[in-house]
Image (cartoon, grey):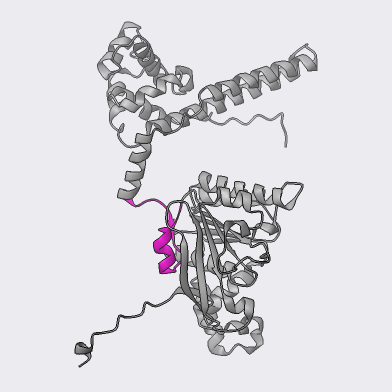
Amino acid sequence: MNHEAGIERPLPHSNDAEQFVIGCILVGSPRAQGVFDWLQPSDFFIPQNQRIFAALKTLFDSQKPTDCLSALHELEQTNRLESAGGVGYLAQLGDNAYKGSVEHEARIIKSHSVRRALIHSADEIREEAFTSPDSADEIVDRIIERFSDIARAIEANRDNGTSYRDAAALLLQEFESQTGVRIFSDIDDLDKLTGGFRAGELVLFTAETGVGKTLLAQQTRRRSCRDGCHSLFCSGEMRAPHLISRELATEANVEHWKMRRPERFSDADWQSLIEAASHECLQCRILDGELSMVRIRKVARQMKSKTGLDLIVVDYDELVEAPGDTEFEQQRYIVRSGKSLAMELACPVIVISQLRKSLQGEDRKKPTLQRLYGSGAKAKHSSIVIYVDRPFVQELDGDETEARIVIAKNRDGKVGAIDARFNVKTLRFESVPKAQPEQPEWMNR
């Protein structure tokens, strides 16, 4: 890269955000008054917007009204009305003042202002490095102080959180618009208890080896895709073709054992598999191979910004590379990172995790959070913990379809066990059909 060749591009700014915030102030939005505490005229990039906000801030600091007429009078008194765009520009700023969040738009303005400050500082640093007669140590000291000023400005204007009333309003808005993410497992009884997995939640699927944790996660992913919610499935255990083979066999109604013996495919099998493959989702993605939280975060953020992302599955935690001197420290990092990613990208994150081997005297039929491997961080940061049990896998005896799902933790709902059935043909967990009540004898007659 040639660092000497400057590239001219527009400095970061958003005229829409600037006009929206000023418009909210002019129409008297109560929540708009708070922006005066952490926005300065210099944070605005468009000269007209900068002059109007400076006039409004003068009025606010003097405890005077900040409506359109007051702003007009203030700009006339200081001979800045024409340079601020004139009466017509000022009057139209309130037109779209009710179509968004003033706090959100104000944060955009501040973020662009900080970026511009960084760009200007970088240019000044570059010029100093070429021309300043001072020593390198003195230049570095000035650079550090300059960036420290920017960091202090960011800290001083840090977001102060959301009021309880605003949080309640946002919740009711989500209920009314039904825009919040809800991911279902396709097991009716389980979905009734959890109400679906929601944005910002960390969900743990755990079970003994071979019971079907990954199958349940794949089932959840497929249901979410049918609902129009797309996912990133991160597998450190299986390559993408291996992971899709079981789902493809189910959709094509091809016996699963044949997926390892493709020479036994009939012409009808081939035709069904090709047809099923053609209907696979182009937006849901698989991330396989060597996994790390850095790689997962990078791909998830790209997917969120480009095509949308509603669910992340990490299969499974012990196969994800993470910093830490011990395995417990690494898993603690993965769990905390998963929770952080769920909050950042506003989607649920499912982490598949192994169970600690049961100790003498522990009842396998009554799982507890203590049986989670590295349980401290997992029990603390998870919103929902789901334990899957299939006695046949452990004992190789009895009913192969018998299954049980235990909600060991449910931050916003009930816990308890659900009887389920494992369909050995489709490799899916299903709700147990409810028995019909017996009819009275007089009805049978």
The answer to whether residue 28 is seen in the rendering is yes
Displayed quadrant of residue 48? top left
Over which residues does the magenta segment extend? Answer: 177-198
Percent of width and height locating residue 219: 51, 68
**Residue at figure coordinates x 56%, y 89% from the top left:** 267
Classify 249 as above or below 130: below
Image quadrant holding the N terminus, namely top right
Task: Please state which of residues 181 and 213 is positioned toward the viewer in this rendering.
Answer: 213
Percent of width and height locating residue 213: 58, 67
Displayed quadrant of residue 24? top left
Q: Residue furthest front?
A: 361
Q: Is residue 266 left or right of residue 225?
A: right
Task: Please state which of residues 211 and 32 is positioned toward the viewer in this rendering.
Answer: 211
Image quadrant holding the C terminus, namely bottom left
* Count of numbered marks: 0
**Residue at figure coordinates x 58%, y 71% from the top left:** 212
The answer to whether residue 299 is seen in the rendering is no
**Residue at figure coordinates x 65%, y 29% from the top left:** 6
Classify 445 as above or below 242: below
Percent of width and height locating residue 440: 23, 85
Q: Is residue 376 left or right of residue 345?
A: right
Classify 13 as above or below 384: above
Task: Please state which of residues 247 and 371 is positioned toward the viewer in this rendering.
Answer: 371
Q: Is residue 157 magenta?
A: no
Percent of width and height locating residue 64: 30, 11
**Residue at figure coordinates x 41%, y 19% from the top left:** 36
